[in-house]
């Protein structure tokens, strides 16, 4: 039995690892065979994303205790997120098969939801196997009866296995949507009274039979156009015959009550941008928006500092490389210049030797004309070669000077960029400090208002207590007078 639970946990972890979606609780890690200090044997854990808003059960309880109903926009945004998560799973042949409010989680803003607890889900591999066999291989015994589809009861009572189908999730989605709208179970009323768990389950089994008592939205809100699209969607998804339901959540994506919201959510709009989160007044909204602005500024500052550091590192690296390159180039240039100077000196030496040879003959007229011409040509070539060497040295010096100017220009440009980054970072820090000050002021205002309200409340309580005391005194006096009157009548 323990090995079965371990294998189920490992399979659930593998399922979650492959489901990367913004409306599915993010998988962090699977801790295998760990022995905590408080345990006697090894255990395994699945580390998941923290959802600060608790489960949808907590959300529903808060809605009831606050005395308000869910708005149409809030219900549409929640439904759109749930359809987005379910359709993502169904496209990958993964079903959840245990949809209920306890498996839907909320983030801190109480409007962004996450689908979690895939303990009854089928992984992609086992889903493929189940499609081939037509039956679920696990999770049948762990379904939640108050949210199970009618086919669960029919096939379990007959001893047959329950066929795996995404239509089970469509049923669960509809029950959750109606409970979000009405704050009560769709099958939770019998003759206008709250039903017990056993009665809810009996209602589900008898669904669409004369004795079934599913509560329609119109029975709660009246015949209004505002809820007609929701009622039509619920009827479509809550068919007792599973073959008449939409096959997967993908078919629900174009429903009128969610289509526009779904498109905007999947294009990057946040749920809290579409509708004000429940349990949030104007002050809370201002504080949340200020905190979001601060978080954005913090991220910008971090990005700028990271960019600045990388730019400085790159600049240092580039400068080092440029210095090395320029030194190497200078060395090469110096080497080239030295060789040219050496060659120039050799040419000068050869020219001088020729001049000496010519002078040694004493009488130029006696030289052979052909030899003289040859000597002159050689002299001319040597002079041309000497001039070419001088020009090459000049060109090398100009190139070296140009390279030095380019390095200085690049250095100046990078210094300007660094100064701009630092200026922008400082401005963001100042803006962040202003936002933090504004946030502190808002919190202080709320605190002052709360203290004033508490003082007024205490004053009212004292006044009420005084009035009660006066009332008791008056009643006591009346009672005394009545007794005196009675005594007077008896005396007469």
Image: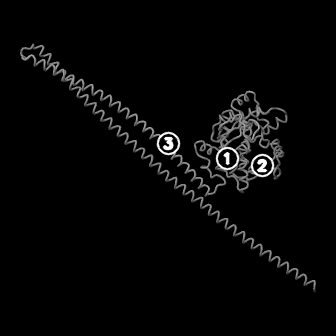
Q: Nearer the viewer, mark 2 or mark 3?
A: 3
Q: Earlier in the sequence, mark 2 or mark 3?
A: 2
Question: Looking at the image, which residue is at 70% across and 56% down?
Answer: 68
Q: CA distance from mark 1 to mark 3?
A: 33 Å
Q: CA distance from mark 2 to mark 1?
A: 26 Å
Q: Secondary structure at mark 3?
A: helix
Which residue in the protein does label 3 denote?
306
> 225 or 442: which is nearer to us?
442
The image position of residue 127, as x and y in percent, is 71, 31
Which residue in the protein does label 1 denote?
106
Check the image and report above or below for 167 versus 360: below
Q: Quadrant of the C terminus?
A: bottom right
Q: Secondary structure at mark 2?
A: loop
Q: Nearer the viewer, mark 1 or mark 3?
A: 3
Q: CA distance from mark 2 to mark 3?
A: 58 Å
Q: Quadrant of the N terminus?
A: top right
Question: Looking at the image, which residue is at 82% across and 52% down?
Answer: 193
Q: Residue furthest bottom?
A: 492
Residue 208 is at least partly visible in this image: no
Marker disc for residue 215:
2
Question: Looking at the image, which residue is at 44% across and 41% down?
Answer: 312
Mark 3 Cα-neighbour bin, 10 Å: few <14, some 14–19, many ≥20: few
The image position of residue 487, as x and y in percent, is 91, 82
């Amino acid at each position: 039995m323990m090995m079965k639970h371990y294998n189920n946990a490992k399979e659930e972890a593998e399922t979650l690892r492959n489901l990367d979606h913004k409306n599915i609780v993010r998988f962090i890690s699977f801790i295998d065979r760990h022995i905590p200090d408080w345990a006697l044997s090894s255990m395994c854990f699945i580390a998941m994303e923290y959802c600060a808003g608790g489960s949808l059960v907590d959300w529903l309880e808060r809605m009831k205790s606050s005395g308000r109903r869910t708005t149409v926009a809030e219900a549409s945004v929640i439904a759109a997120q749930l359809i987005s998560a379910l359709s993502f799973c169904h496209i990958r042949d993964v079903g959840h098969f245990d949809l209920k409010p306890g498996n839907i989680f909320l983030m801190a803003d109480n409007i962004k939801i996450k689908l979690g607890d895939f303990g009854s889900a089928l992984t992609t591999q086992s889903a493929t196997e189940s499609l081939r066999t037509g039956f679920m291989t696990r999770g049948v015994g762990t379904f939640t009866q108050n949210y199970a589809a009618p086919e669960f009861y029919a096939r379990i009572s007959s001893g047959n296995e329950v066929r795996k189908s995404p239509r089970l999730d469509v049923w669960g989605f509809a029950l959750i949507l109606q409970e979000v709208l009405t704050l009560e179970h769709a099958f939770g009323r019998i003759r206008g009274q709250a039903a017990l768990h056993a009665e809810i389950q009996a209602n589900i089994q008898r669904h669409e039979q004369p004795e079934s008592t599913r509560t329609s939205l119109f029975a709660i809100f009246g015949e209004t156009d505002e809820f007609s699209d929701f009622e039509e969607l619920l009827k479509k998804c809550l068919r007792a015959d599973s073959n008449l339901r939409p096959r997967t959540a993908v078919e629900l994506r174009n429903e009128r009550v969610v289509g526009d919201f779904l498109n905007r959510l999947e294009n990057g709009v946040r749920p809290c941008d579409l509708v004000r989160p429940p349990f949030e007044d104007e002050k809370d909204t201002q504080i949340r928006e200020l905190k979001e602005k601060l978080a954005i500024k913090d991220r910008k500052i971090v990005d700028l500092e990271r960019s600045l550091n990388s730019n400085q590192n790159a600049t240092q690296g580039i400068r080092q490389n440029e210095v090395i390159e320029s030194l190497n180039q200078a060395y090469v240039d110096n080497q080239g210049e030295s060789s040219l100077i050496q060659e120039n000196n050799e040419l000068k030496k050869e020219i001088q030797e020729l001049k000496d040879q010519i002078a040694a003959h004493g009488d130029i007229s006696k030289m052979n004309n052909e030899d003289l011409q040859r000597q002159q040509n050689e002299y001319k070539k040597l002079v041309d070669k000497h001039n070419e060497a001088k020009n090459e040295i000049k060109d090398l010096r100009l190139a070296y000077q140009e390279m030095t100017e380019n390095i200085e220009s690049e250095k100046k440009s990078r210094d300007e960029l660094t100064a701009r980054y630092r200026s922008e970072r400082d401005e963001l820090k100042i803006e962040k400090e202003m936002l933090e000050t504004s946030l502190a002021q808002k919190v202080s205002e709320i605190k002052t208002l709360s203290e004033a309200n508490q003082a007024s409340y205490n004053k009212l309580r004292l006044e009420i207590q005084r009035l009660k005391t006066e009332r008791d005194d008056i009643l006591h006096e009346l009672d005394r007078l009545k007794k005196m009157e009675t005594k007077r009548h008896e005396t007469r």
